[in-house]
Amino acid sequence: MKSITATQAKQEFGNVILRSQIAPISVTRNGNPVSVIMSETQYQSMKLQNLRAALIEGEQSGDAGTLDMEAIKLKARMLLKNVENT
C-alpha cells in the first residue's frame, strides 16, 4: 500500500482522492500510520465481507437461537475495525 504524510495528503488532496480509487493509501503523521483513504466501492466491499463472515460464524456456531441483527452488525464492525488497524 502506498503511504504518504498527512501534510502531503492535505496539499494534494484532490490527487490523493483520485489515486485512492485505484488502491488504498495509508496516511502517516510523525511516521506513524493514522488513516487509510480508499474508494467507496472498496469500503462497501469490506463491510459486506465482514457482515458475511459474521453471518457464517453465526451459522457455524450451532446455536439455534434467534437471529440478533444488532449483534451481527456489531461483530461486523469489530471485524472491520480489526482490518483497518492492520
Image (tube, rainbow, N blue to C red):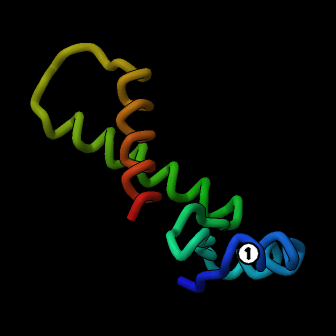
Identity of the residue furthest to the bottom in this view: 2
Q: In the displayed structure, does residue 47 sit left or right of residue 36?
A: left
Q: Residues within 10 Å of mark 1 (few under 14, many from 20)?
A: some
Q: Nearer the viewer, residue 18 or 30?
A: 30
* Quadrant where the image shows the C terminus: bottom left
Under circle 1, the secondary element is loop
Whether residue 39 is situated above or below residue 48 in the rendered picture = below
Q: In the displayed structure, does residue 81 sit left or right of residue 22?
A: left
x and y, in percent, of residue 62 in the image = 10, 30
Q: Quadrant of residue 28?
A: bottom right
Q: In the displayed structure, does residue 68 sit left or right of residue 15?
A: left
Q: In the displayed structure, does residue 86 sit left or right of residue 21?
A: left
Identity of the residue furthest to the front in this view: 30
Q: Which residue is mark 1?
A: 21
Identity of the residue furthest to the top in this view: 66
The amino acid sitting under disc 1 is Gln
x and y, in percent, of residue 35 in the image = 59, 62
Residue drawn at x 87%, y 76% as measured from the top left: 11
User: In the rendered picture of this protein, how many numbered marks are placed on residues?
Assistant: 1
Q: Nearer the viewer, residue 53 or 33?
A: 33
Residue drawn at x 13%, y 34% as measured from the top left: 61
Whether residue 58 is situated above or below residue 63 in the rendered picture = below
x and y, in percent, of residue 33 in the image = 52, 69
Q: Quadrant of residue 77?
A: top left
Residue drawn at x 32%, y 39% as measured from the top left: 55
Residue drawn at x 86%, y 78% as measured from the top left: 12
x and y, in percent, of residue 63 in the image = 13, 24
